[in-house]
Every structure is written in C-alpha cells, then in structure tokens.
Image (cartoon, rainbow, N blue to C red):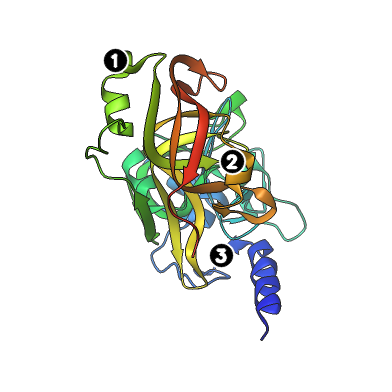
Amino acid sequence: MSRGAQRARRIVLAFVALVLTACGGTAGAFSFNTPPTIYDLTQRPQEFAGKEVTAQGYYLWKPGDPATSVLLPGLSTADGTRDAQPIYASVTCEANGECKPSTTTVGEASTGAVWLENFPAEVTADLHRPGDSVWGVVEVTGLFEAAGGYGPNGAYRYRMQVRQAKPLQKVERLVSAVKDEPLGEGKVSIFELARAPEQYRDQTVTSQGYYFWSPATQGMFVERVEREKTPENAEGLAPAPGGVTMGMDGFPADKSGELHVGPNGSFVWGLVEVTGTFQIGSFADGRYQQQIKVDSARVLEQPK
C-alpha cells in the first residue's frame, strides 16, 4: 500500500466513530467486558437511580463556558485525536422515566449521556489530550442520579457524582523537554524567568525552550511538548505544551517553517533560542502572565 493510500485510510478510519456496542464491545480494538456500561445506565436508568454504580464508557471533557464533562457510548474525531464530538445513546423514554433502545431516533444529550461531576483530574493524564478536549475509555464509580435537570442549563437527565475513576486504555506519550539547568553566560533559563519574573521585567533576555503555536494557544514559550505515541508516526500525534509556560509574541514566521508543522498548519513546535523583551502583565486574552516579545530567534533542533 502506498504512503498516500495509508494516509487516506487513516483519515477515513479517524472519521469512523469509536462506539461502545450494547452487547459489550466496541467497533474498534477495545473490548468492554465488565457490565454495566453507559448503555445500561441510559436504557434502564430507574434500575440504577440512587445507587452507587460502576460503569464503563467514553469520557469526554471539552472547555467552554460552561465546559462539557460527560460519559458517552462513543465519539468521533477528525484525525484520530482532535475535534472529538459526542455520540449519544439512541433511546426513547416514557413520562415515568422508563427508557428503551431505539433504532429510529437520533441520540441526544438529555437522555443519551451521563453528566459527570468531580471527575478526577489526575486520571486525565492517561487519556487523549489533543488540546481541544480530553477523552478516553474509562471506568467510573459514583452515585447515579436520574431526577433530571443536571449539567449546564439542566440539559441532562442523568448525573454521576464520581467517587473514583480509572482509564481502561492508557495513552503512551513522547516527551521533549528542556532541563532546569544554567544556560551559560548572558542567558537565562525559562525556569529562572518563571521563578523570579520581577528580576527580569522589561529586560532583554536570551533563553531556550520550546516554541509552540496552535489556533487555541497562540504563540507560547514552554518547558516541554508531549505527543501521543503511535507506530505510524515517529514524531507522535496531538502535540500539547506542558510544564512552565508563558506567551511568545513575534516569533519569526520564516523560523516556524524549520520546526514541526502540523497538517494544514494546525500546530507548530520545536526547540528554539530566542532573544527579546521579557514582559509581565496580561497577554493573549489573559492566558499568560508573562511573555517574551521576540527580537530574534534561532532553531536549535530541526525535525528529522
């Protein structure tokens, strides 16, 4: 199979939804083997209402005002990781709360998902984190409620007060990071800038770190970049910034082309040395409290 055909196949597969089936399996490689699942909760809610329940499904968190935090039977993505969209269980419910599977109605948020409260933040470290969402296969335990009026604008009929959770598929990551050590005469590390920002306010500094850009983040100067490990891509998928972070304004466009560049310019990242003015304030709509306004930059490591 040609490289182009392989790429096309991955794109097609990425648009195929990852869906948990009612009989306890998935359309993909993962098999759910411990009932109940999200389907049981949405198809027989009265059986579980008011009880502590352990259930499996797809966790999806998306930022926003308000944010989304739900348990789903499936989701779809644009490229295998990014732009995760919920797929809801298709059920019909009577006025008395009794529900049953439906093959004719389209699933909707109110009856086809469970709103999750208090999902443990530490569990998300092992899930997919492409930058625009957090998602993955999980098992959650908590009090299941079915009185309705949960979540934003009371849009969800079901809620679980999560007591504990665990990932059922752990995502392996590749990490590129700078070390917390002196850079030599005339240079200051990103760690030192973060530890003593007032010492360097409005001064010209030279520092080393990872430049990261995406439509969601704008320009950033960061300690590390993490990617999801995959056998098909040596560079990894879904790069995300981490560790010490600050804004970066004015990174030269011609230097961006020497770094890792995502499909359709969806991201740029790489190891750089920059010289510029270190500023303190509110930048990029309040996302960063410090930034470097770049005068010059050089790439320290080019893609292989």
Q: Residues within 10 Å of mark 1 (few under 14, many from 20)?
A: few
The kind of secondary structure element at disc 1 is helix
Q: Which mark is residue 288?
A: none
Q: Marks 3 and 1, how far apart in space?
A: 60 Å
Q: Which mark is residue 214?
A: 2
What residue did someone put label 1 on? 199
Nearest the eye: 90 or 240: 240
From where the camera sits, is residue 258 visible?
yes
The spot of residue 50 in percent (x, y) is 40, 38
Q: Are marks 1 and 2 in contact (CB under 8 Å)?
A: no
Q: Which badge, 3 or 2, comes first in the chain's sequence?
A: 3
User: From the viewer's perspective, is 138 left or right of 66?
Assistant: left
From where the camera sits, is residue 59 visible?
no
Tell how many labels: 3
**Residue drawn 48% across the image and 62% down it:** 235
The spot of residue 14 in percent (x, y) is 64, 64
Q: Which mark is residue 22?
A: 3
**Residue drawn 39% across the image and 41% down it:** 209
Q: Quadrant of residue 198?
A: top left
| Quadrant assignment for the N terminus | bottom right
**Residue drawn 59% across the image and 36% down it:** 216
